[in-house]
Amino acid sequence: MITIKNSEQIELMRQAGRLLYEVLQMAAHMVKPGVSTKALNDAVDQMIRDHHAEPSFFHYEGFPASLCTSVNDCVVHGIPSKKEILREGDIISLDCGVKLNGWQSDSALTVGVGEISKEAQALIRRTEECFFEGARRAVAGNRLGDIGHAVQQHAEKAGYGVVRDLSGHGIGREMHEDPAVYNYGIEHYGAPVKAGMTIAIEPMITLGDWHVESDEDGWFFRTLDGSISSHYEHTIAVMENGLPEILTLPGFHWEGEN
């Protein structure tokens, strides 16, 4: 069931989103050659708890960490490890959730480790653009298919793959709520977008083919062809009028808005 949030509930999610933004910015600044993914996780976990919040991912459906660290061909759900040391030229997706005062936020970004290739830079940039293309369609009166269609078209126009097996989602008191928010779709199709909906839009875009498979542990999802993958996500609120508010990107204003 899709839940509609009131202004007070959205404000609580805004507070959780603001903290999560600061957490991910801190983690992104730590990314450099020689750093372990476990060190990133430990810093994130500490910062969240220091702010009297909960790391949403920790023990969620058995996940053993507070941060997903997905390197190169790993699309999502990478488990941090002291043995996984970042190397020059890698790219890494940092995906995290924060629960504050009973309300959730979810966000991810992909960053380069040291100097990365031009093709990796272009993939990361395009993935971020895909998010904004999709989020622009999260307007009351549209349908969920409009969001997915916009993401898909922007990625495929550049020759990239759009992962089909994983999706964005509703979010609120729970990390994953209805509806599923796919990164592909048909315009004017799917559930209607309504004011008060809060959803996480998260393009997962690959340099090569879009097919993925999970490791034996059931967590790591990797590209079948070994191509690198980029992930970018924000939690948004559909507003009564105009474009959505990005709750995990404080201070952001859509072009042309005050």
Image (cartoon, helix red, strand yellow):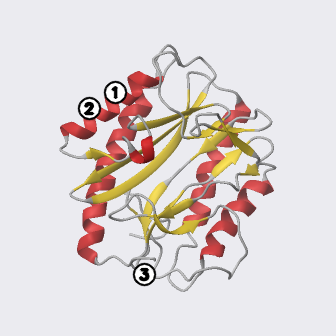
Quick one: SS at disc 1?
Answer: helix
**Is residue 82 visible in the rendered structure shown here?**
yes
Q: Whole-Å distance between the Cαs marked 3 and 2? A: 35 Å
Name above or below for residue 75 compared with residue 198: above
Q: Are marks 3 and 2 in contact (CB under 8 Å)?
A: no
The residue beneath circle 1 is 42
Q: Are marks 2 and 1 in contact (CB under 8 Å)?
A: yes
The residue beneath circle 3 is 195
- Mark 1: which amino acid? Asp
For residue 244, which quarter of the picture?
bottom left
Q: Whole-Å distance between the Cαs marked 2 and 1? A: 6 Å
x%, y% of residue 217?
58, 34
- Mark 2: which amino acid? Gln
What's the residue at 65%, 67% (across, down)? 148
Name above or below for residue 136 compared with residue 40: below
> 10 Å neighbourhood of mark 1: few (<14), some, or many (≥20)?
some
x%, y% of residue 3?
40, 76
Name above or below for residue 189 compared with residue 217: below
- Mark 3: which amino acid? Ala
x%, y% of residue 167?
60, 58
x%, y% of residue 231?
58, 45
The residue beneath circle 2 is 46
Comes first in the chain, label 3 or label 1: 1
Q: Nearer the viewer, residue 151 or 81?
A: 81
> Is residue 207 left or right of 128 when viewed as pictured?
right
> Is residue 186 left or right of 45 when viewed as pictured?
right
**Is residue 249 visible in the rendered structure shown here?**
no
What's the residue at 68%, 54% (across, down)? 165
Comes first in the chain, label 3 or label 2: 2
